[in-house]
Amino acid sequence: MDKKKILILGASGFVGNAIYKELCSYFDTYGTYCSNTSFATNKQFLRYDLQEDDIFQVLENVRPDVIISALRGSFGAQIQAHQHLMEYLMKYKTKLYFISSANVFDAYSKFPSYEYDKTLSESVYGRLKIKIENMMMRLPKEKTAILRIPMVFGNTSPRVREIKTSLENNEAIEVFPNLIINVTNDDRLTQQIHYLINRNKTGIFHLGSTDLIHHEDFIKDIIKRMGNYHPLIKRVYTTNEDRYLAALPKDHMLPKNLMITSQEIIDHHIPVD
């Protein structure tokens, strides 16, 4: 049987590249990069500039069975690229897995959010994700999967690297004491995506930890795990009450071995000095 052909849009970014590394041994996997020329020599990578190039060109070259969109960059250009993706999906036997965000719920701060809750966002980023999700919902159900993810941590994640740099330079680390979140890391997230593709799953999935934690507590636990530091903590209060930014799974649960808790992320996936 031929290997499934997968195209990851934005495969040079942190999440996109983690997905590429997870899938490339199992599928015929291609990725796009824009400015990071270290990918130029990799035959599986195609250069694609969101603002200048037409996505159709990339799609014609690869003819993927599955597209994973982890694009970043100009919001206007992202919307246009996804409109073209929708046209392509209607013509060909292709599925789209879209990396969305817990931010599609950032206007609802009183509760965590589940798969079928109504989306509403106060942030430009959240509204961009909602716009693309809404485009996808007009397509036949078997064509798309919306993967909403919370903050991503992990050894090489920009968030963890930033904390490490701040500790080394004795700079203040921002925490949000009133913010209740769920979290994930690149390892578990990419295993979950691998599972969804293997099982041909479609629909809406919330791919974060099954528990909730205060942002401040989580960051402090990460720092403790990294070594004996005395960090400068800058507390940022956006409201007086607790507010939630958490997309929890309820309707589409994954197998137990693919679930993760915030504590496991700290225990297994944060580098210890």
Image: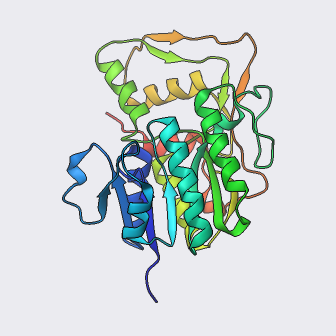
Coordinates of residue 228 in the picture (x, y in percent) = 37, 22
List x then y, in percent, for residue 167: 35, 19
Q: Quadrant of residue 271?
A: top left
Left or right of residue 58, residue 267 in this image = right
Kindly give the residue lying farthest to the bottom in the view shown.
1
Q: Residue at x 35, y 19 (%)?
A: 166
Is residue 162 depicted above or below 100 in this figure? above
**103 in relation to 109, above or below:** below
Total labels drawn: 0
**Side (left or right) of 232 relative to 265:** left
- Which quadrant of the rendered structure holds the C terminus? top left
What x and y, as percent, mark residue 58? 39, 61
Q: Is residue 266 visible?
A: no
In this view of the protein, which residue sits in the foreground, 170 or 66? 66
> In the image, is residue 264 above or below residue 220?
below
Quarter of image, res 229: top left
* Residue 43 visible within the image: yes
Spot occupied by residue 150 in the image (x, y as percentages of width and height): 59, 39
